[in-house]
Image (cartoon, rainbow, N blue to C red):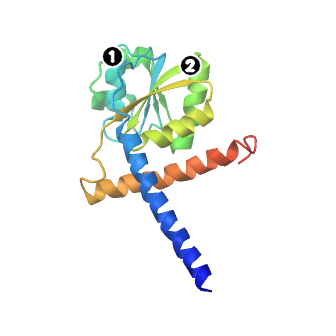
Amino acid sequence: MRAAISIIRFGAFALVIAAVLGFALFVRAGTGHAQPDRVDGDAIVALTGGEGRVATGVALLADGHGERLLISGGNPEVTMDAIRAAAGAPPALFDCCVDIGLEAANTVGNADETARWAAGHGYQRLVIVTSDFHMPRALLELSAAMPDSELVPYGVATPPPWTSTRAARRWLQEYLKFAAVYARETLRAPLGGQA
């Protein structure tokens, strides 16, 4: 009986250590997706849901880092003019080169919407703009939806988890979502995409 309790304690301890180490690696990966040296792509995709994502995507488009911008997960109640004004972009840029996807309600939806949009335009190299804490999971979902595409992460910096309880909670919630997606994709590979 004592041996069984020792094994359970050791297993619980190992699980806690693995979770803490996993979270630390997740934070390192998230904060490591800031602005890369080379951000040029065929196009740019900004995933909605966080402050600065759309404005950053528009700025990259205006600077010539892609020929079109998809704003994925747009709110159908928000007009194109309101989005343009919030991003501070000239109307001509929006008229020629910005598409707003209205179908995605979550990151899986962003990935599906982006895959269809990129295929429809023949884009292979995409600059992905989202919050730094969201980037690891977004890249997993996008890679699953379009495995032959090259994804260039461009993270929008957010407060790191050690700065406040709110930031810690946000990063931890995203880590748990990332872990679930990572487990799903890890199981999917040996099962031939059936997980």
The picture quadrant where one finds residue 71 is: top left
Tell me the residue at 72%/41% (across/down). Answer: 193
Q: What residue type is labelled 2?
A: Gln
Horizontal relation, residue 165 to residue 135: left or right: left
The spot of residue 62 in percent (x, y) is 33, 16
**Res. 49 in view:** no
In the image, which disc is placed on residue 30? none
Mark nearer the viewer, 2 or 1: 2
Q: Residue at (33%, 18%) from the top-left corner?
A: 91
The residue most toward the front is 3
Q: Whole-percent x and y of residue 149? A: 58, 24
152 vs 54, left or right, is right
Identify the residue at image location x=47%, y=19%.
43
What is the x, y in percent for residue 161?
A: 31, 52
**Mark pair 2, 1: CA separation:** 20 Å
Q: Which mark is residue 124?
A: 2
Query: Looking at the image, which residue sits at the far left?
Result: 163
Q: Quadrant of residue 170?
A: bottom left
Q: Is residue 121 left or right of residue 154?
A: right
User: x and y percent of residue 33 in the render?
Assistant: 38, 34
Position of residue 152 relative to residue 8, above or below, is: above
Label 1 SS: helix
Q: Within 10 Å of the Cα at label 2, are there few (<14), some (14-19), or many (20+) other Cα atoms?
A: some
Judged left or right of residue 17, residue 64 is: left
Q: Which residue is drawn at 75% across and 40% down?
A: 192
* Mark 1 crowd level (few <14, some 14–19, many ≥20, 10 Å Cα): some
| Earlier-in-chain disc, 2 versus 1 | 1
Identify the secondary structure beneath mark 2: loop
Circles 2 and 1 in contact, beta carbons < 8 Å: no
Quarter of the image with the N terminus is bottom right
What is the three-letter code of the residue carrying label 1? Answer: Ala
The residue wearing badge 1 is 62
